Amino acid sequence: MTWARAFTGSTRLPRHTIDRRDNVPAQTSRQRQELLLFARNFLKHPRMLGSVIPSSRFLVNEMLGEVDWDRARVIVEYGPGVGTFTHKILKRLHPDAILVAIEMNTDFVGFLQRTTSDPRLHLVHGSAADVGSILQRLGRGKADYIISGIPFSTMGPALRDGIVRATRDALTPTGSFLCYQYSNGVLPNLKRTFGRVKLGFEPRNIPPARLYYCKP
Ligand SMILES: C[S@@+](CC[C@H](N)C(=O)[O-])C[C@H]1O[C@@H](n2cnc3c(N)ncnc32)[C@H](O)[C@@H]1O
């Protein structure tokens, strides 16, 4: 094989190789719009976002692989951003189930309202700290899964602890809290609050992400 062929012939990467283009898939105008909106908001609110680009498909698929889609009827997502997890959750979600997406950022709420019309999605402009009262208002009881992308590491200790406790209280006894982070800061809170915490790691994300799968 010639040098030129080696570099131009195939775009397939060996297994476990990080395809960095995957975190920056600026191929369609929708994807470009999402990336720009996300990056612009990172510059405005770096602590609220905690990352300059949305999650990779590797991270999304790894976390959503933990969900029992036949069983789940109420799923909550914290911090949907531009909808990177949201769209994939809606694709797999049971027809009778609902997804409650709680987002603090006004621009992201507006963007999701304009671009997502699934009747199973309940988009709430608010904080994960209020998950209990939000579920109560919707009259759908407790959650089977809570999936989180919010940056616990940039929060003060009281808010971090408050959200972790509110999350456990908002889950059914067999429910799960699935969470990713870029540092281990929230791990002591999770261990204190949940009965079981399983650890995972996704190196093919930028930055590489720690995963926590928690049971009450
Ligand atoms: C790292 S981004 C994750 C976005 C998307 N889920 C992803 O994985 O690409 C964190 C998101 O959490 C939101 N957020 C931060 N604190 C929050 C809170 N207390 N309640 C709800 N959303 C919050 C931010 O506005 C942002 O959309």
Image (cartoon, rainbow, N blue to C red):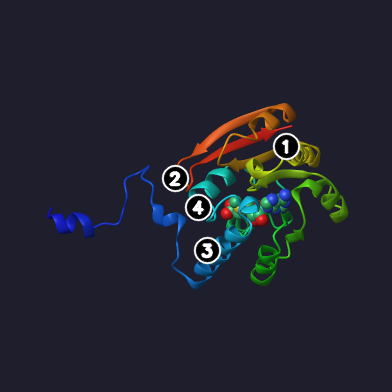
Residue that mark 2 sits on: 204
Q: Where is residue 117, by image quadrant? A: bottom right
Q: Position of residue 22 (x, y in %)?
A: 43, 55
Q: Nearer the viewer, residue 66 or 32?
A: 32
Q: CA distance from mark 1 to mark 3?
A: 30 Å
**In this figure, which residue is indicated by the disc labeled 4?**
57
Residue at mark 1 to residue at mark 4: CA–CA distance: 30 Å
Q: Is residue 71 visible?
A: no
Q: Secondary structure at mark 3?
A: helix
Which tag, 1 or 4, sits closer to the chain's start? Answer: 4
Look at discs 1 and 3 and give the one toward the viewer: 1
Q: CA distance from mark 1 to mark 2?
A: 29 Å
Sequence-first disc among 1 and 3: 3
The residue indicated by pointer 3 is: 35
User: Residue 23, percent across and down?
Assistant: 46, 55
Crowding near the residue tagged with mark 2, few <14, some 14–19, many ≥20 C-alpha atoms within 10 Å: some
Provide the secondary structure element on which disc 1 rests: helix
Q: Position of residue 114 (x, y in %)?
A: 67, 72
Label drawn at residue 157: 1
How many residues crowd around disc 3 within 10 Å: few (fewer than 14), some, or many (20 or more)? many
Choose between 181 and 58: the one closer to the eye. Answer: 181
